[in-house]
Amino acid sequence: MNAGLILIGTFFILLVLNVPIAWSIGMSVTLYMLTSGSFGLSYIAQTMFTACDSFTLMAIPLFILAGALMEGGGLSKRLIDFADSMVGHRQGGLAIVTVLACMFFGAISGSAAATVATIGVIMVPSMIKQGYSKGFSYALIAAAGVLGVLIPPSIPFVTYGVATNASIATMFMGGFGPGILCGVLLIAVSQFICRKNGWQGNGRQFTWKRVGQTFVSAIGALLVPVIILGGIYGSVFTPTEAAAVAVVYALVVGFLIYRELTFKKLVASLSTSAVTTATIMVIVGTATALARMLTLEKIPMELANWIGGLTDSRILVLLAMNVFLLLVGCVMDGTPAILILAPILQPIAADYGVDIIHFGLMMCLNVAIGFCTPPVGLNLFVASSLGNIQFMSLCRRIVPFLLALVVGLLLVTYIPVISLGIPWLFGYGS
């Protein structure tokens, strides 16, 4: 048990010292092995290799590349134009457009940070020019960026499926309910703030002609989720094969249809995707090693017994898990949080009758909220760097949106049909 305390203690000390997450995990596992004598150091390298040697995990770099190619190919701008044509004229309409654009782009990218960067560069300057405050605009885009990992396809959904052997296709089906719910809640909060401050729309008159024109222009982008998700649900291809199809589709649309994807943009997309993938895979490898060490120390069993001894109430257990995961999200990135904690917490939730898909979507929503909570919220850093706005100022501005997301989390936690409604329609659980 002393070695287990060293493992956990070292990990959290390194996190507090702001050591990068992959190094924090790797160094704590290495120290554990040296003190326990249970394994040779070569075990770390073997575990990292076998953890990444997965057909399912191939979906992550492919979805990352597909999102980068679609961004470079002009799909994001056309999605924003389509959303703007529908609601941009309303009071506070540009805020609605921002949220809808994040939802649309989430169906392409699967990444929260990419959603913030891509939609933020286009939408925030327009909002500020129309009179919206800078703090509100960047807080909104930071919060709405979480929709990038809630609307499928989603990298956290794939990660959770790998960690718990849950069906990734079913996770994708279930993701629409929580994603749309959180989008609606963010729109409601933004509308309240916009009406309070008298912020208007884009100043253009609504016409069905413009809606039709922007729809035709954006149809190449709108077909992406139809092709990807339709192929998965129709059993035409697996999620990993769907990611490969998305890459090919992005190349065809970017080069041949919209003709905005140049060789220079292609190289930039490949470079960005390679760096992002490498970062994720190092975390996957070290987090898998940490999870195995925790299991060896019987920490999941001890935690399960401890929670079971506290209460028999399913409501309180789920509430405690949510609080714990929200706190974890403040100090840990989503990928290691899922890889380390999902195998521990999911069996505990199952003991209380919580479906594996329901719990997965609840956990992924917690992880998504962590993207915009200080001190390590990635969306906050991306938004603050985009707008050259003080980090703490952005943290204060995002509070109303965080409260809306927490309300969405509680609804998803205690109303299973939000997560499982669509999977049930497709015969899940029957």
Image (cartoon, rainbow, N blue to C red):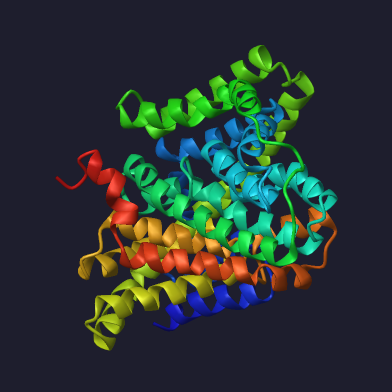
**Considering the image in quadrants, where does the C terminus appear?**
top left
Q: Residue furthest top?
A: 256
Q: Can you give x and y, in whole percent of width and height, for residue 162 in the image?
A: 38, 48
Going 56% across and 64% down the picture, which residue do you hit?
A: 370
Q: Relative to 85, does residue 354 appear above or below in the rendering? A: below
Residue at 81% over, 60% down: 134
In this rendering, position of residue 315 left or right of residue 289: left
Task: Report which quarter residue 69 is drawn in.
Answer: top right
Residue toward you, 23 or 157: 157
Q: On the image, which quarter does residue 19 sit in?
A: bottom right
Q: Residue at x 28, y 70 (%)?
A: 348
| Residue 103, picture quadrant | top right
Residue sitting farthest toward the bottom: 310
Residue 224 in view, yes or no? yes
Q: Residue at x 52, y 53 (%)?
A: 183
Give whichever of 359, 21 is nearer the camera.
359
Of 120 and 9, nearer the camera is: 120
Is residue 39 something that shows in the picture? no
Horizontal and vertical percent position of residue 416: 29, 59
Quadrant in the picture for the N terminus: bottom left
List x then y, in percent, for residue 43. Answer: 46, 55
Q: How many marks?
A: 0
Residue 387 percent across, percent down from the top left: 82, 55
Q: Is residue 229 above or below residue 9?
A: above
